[in-house]
Amino acid sequence: MDTPTEANARFADFALEVLDTRHLWILRNDEGYAHWSSENGVCFPIWSQQQMAERAALRSLPGYQPEQLVLDVFRDSVLPKLRDKKIWLGVNLTDEMCGIEIPCEQFEKEIASRVV
């Protein structure tokens, strides 16, 4: 089970790691990027570490592979499209896809705005 404390810690780790490495990880297969419907609407998962994305794919989304994405490209190209479609972001989710799901606007406020 995933507690709010654990989810918040992974979110904080995501911010530190992504701002340091300047890239993040998404899941993709031949048909496109991983996403699913959740209680908040459609969710698009992102991770700060390749290993976390790999574990999530193996456990919860077989057939998907981690793909590295430069943070600036995500912020400038991908994030606006997700925001326009009102898609939420699942940040550093567990391999069972548990954790924090936030709207793109909150992500931009808390993380993307720190990128110079």
Image (cartoon, helix red, strand yellow):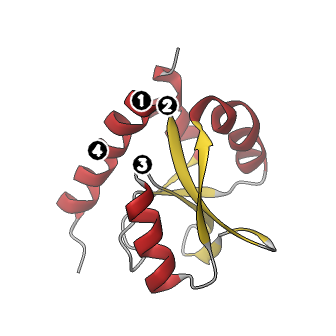
Q: Secondary structure at mark 4?
A: helix
Placement of 116 over or under 72, stated as above or below: above
Residue designated by label 4: 13
Query: Left or right: where does residue 86 sit relative to residue 14?
Result: right
Percent of width and height locating residue 29: 72, 72
Residue designated by label 1: 19
Q: Are marks 3 and 4 in contact (CB under 8 Å)?
A: yes
Residue designated by label 2: 22
CA distance separating discs 4 and 1: 10 Å
Q: Residue at x 58, y 39 (%)?
A: 105
Placement of 18 over or under 97, stated as above or below: above
Residue nearer the viewer, 12 or 95: 95
Earlier sequence position, callout 3 versus callout 4: 4
Percent of width and height locating residue 25: 53, 52
Check disc 3 and give the amino acid type.
Answer: Ser
Check disc 2 and give the amino acid type.
Answer: Arg
CA distance separating discs 3 and 1: 9 Å
CA distance separating discs 1 and 2: 5 Å
Q: Secondary structure at mark 2?
A: loop
Residue 100 in view in this figure: no
Q: Are marks 1 and 2 in contact (CB under 8 Å)?
A: yes
Residue 104 in view in this figure: yes
Residue designated by label 3: 48
- The residue sitting at the top extreme is 116
Earlier sequence position, callout 4 versus callout 1: 4
Earlier sequence position, callout 4 versus callout 2: 4
Q: Residue at x 62, y 44 (%)?
A: 69
Check disc 1 and give the amino acid type.
Answer: Leu
Q: Secondary structure at mark 3?
A: loop
